[in-house]
């Protein structure tokens, strides 16, 4: 005879099976195997340069960036340096003055050309750097120079005065149109947007080369440089990573990439080998913009 208790137990099991607790993210290695956060942190601590590739509007991504920063700082207090794509090299002075308490938060946020999502996505990390006296390096090329390259090509930068060239990678930079990330851009239909199809990947190259130049220039042996940037700049160890390898081939570099999937219990094969570690987040995750 089936008792009421057995029926209730059966319904409870069915309910727990049908409504599993949702996860905000999952972590995988480059072969798609689920990996523990503690394992990743242990690996990052052995690196020279770490790239945390992000999706700019994903809150889980930015939250985990802060957690990684905090956990690396807990054991690498003297050796941790931060840097990011979201700050342009000619804003380094303002960033330094703010972190060193020479100017107010209000002045910094008014004068620096901050991204619209700075307050929701990056302010916490800058505040952490400020509170703990960590260096934070502005690595990205000033947008006016990237725009000039998009319109007129890399040759345009040769006409810059010498005092302006200090904000970009030394010219001429390497150009490799067979590198998959740039090859894809070259194959895009840019009709009516730029005079020469090569100008589009060239604008990306000057960003990547400049970020590599300022990362390497602000890293010293024994330090750990943690860099935040959009996925495109470091996926498949191309972009910034490729330019860094031109400067110092034997750097120990670890790359994290962020992806969105409908389900995150398994990593989609398309994302295998995209990075050393892949942060998978549900597609339906809310966005910051």
Image (tube, helix red, strand yellow):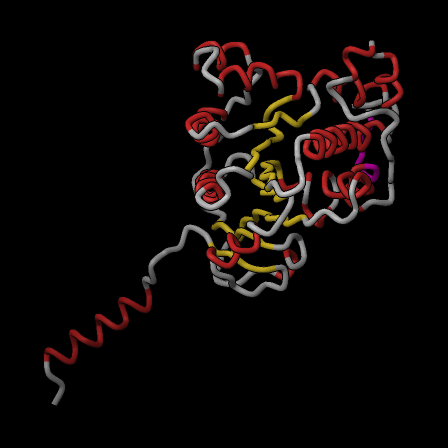
Q: Quadrant of the N terminus?
A: bottom left
Q: Whole-percent x and y of residue 278?
A: 57, 53
**Vertical placement of residue 158 versus 42, above or below:** above
Q: Within the magenta stretch, is there residue 81?
A: no
**Vertical placement of residue 3 versus 139, above or below:** below
Q: Which residues are magenta?
A: 186-191
Residue that appears at 56% across and 28% down = 136
Q: Within the magenta stretch, is there residue 190?
A: yes
Q: Whole-percent x and y of residue 92?
A: 61, 19
Q: Which residue is nearer to you in this view: 173 or 246?
A: 246
Residue that appears at 49% across and 58% down = 264
Q: Whole-percent x and y of residue 215?
A: 68, 33
Q: Which residue is nearer to you in this view: 212 or 249?
A: 249
Residue 160 left/right relative to 70: right
Residue 264 left/right relative to 250: left
For this orientation, the residue located farthest to the bottom is 1
Camera sees residue 181 = yes
Residue that appears at 88% across and 17% down = 158
């Amino acid at each position: 005879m089936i008792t009421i208790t057995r029926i209730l137990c059966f319904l409870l099991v069915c309910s727990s099976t049908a409504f599993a607790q949702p996860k905000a993210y999952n972590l995988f290695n480059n072969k798609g195997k689920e990996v523990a956060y503690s394992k990743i942190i242990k690996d990052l601590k052995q690196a020279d340069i770490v790239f945390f590739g992000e999706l700019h509007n994903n809150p889980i991504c930015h939250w985990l960036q802060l957690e990684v920063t905090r956990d690396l700082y807990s054991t690498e207090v003297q050796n941790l340096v931060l840097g990011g794509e979201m700050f342009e090299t000619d804003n380094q002075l303002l960033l330094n003055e703010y972190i060193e308490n020479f100017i107010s938060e209000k002045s910094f946020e008014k004068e620096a050309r901050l991204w619209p999502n700075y307050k929701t996505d990056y302010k916490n990390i800058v505040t952490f750097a400020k509170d703990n006296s960590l260096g934070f390096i502005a690595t990205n090329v000033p947008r006016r120079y990237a725009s000039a390259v998009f319109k007129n090509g890399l040759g345009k930068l040769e006409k810059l005065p010498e005092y302006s060239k200090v904000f970009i990678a030394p010219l001429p930079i390497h150009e490799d149109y067979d590198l998959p990330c740039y090859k894809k851009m070259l194959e895009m239909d840019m009709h009516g947007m730029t005079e020469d199809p090569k100008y589009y990947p060239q604008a990306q190259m000057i960003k990547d080369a400049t970020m590599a130049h300022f990362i390497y220039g602000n890293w010293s042996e024994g330090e750990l440089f943690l860099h935040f940037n959009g996925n495109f700049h470091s996926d498949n160890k191309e972009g910034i990573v490729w330019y860094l390898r031109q400067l110092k081939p034997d750097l120990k570099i670890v790359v994290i990439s962020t992806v969105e999937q409908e389900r995150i219990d398994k990593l989609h094969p398309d994302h295998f080998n995209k990075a050393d570690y892949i942060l998978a987040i549900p597609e339906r995750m809310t966005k910051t913009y």
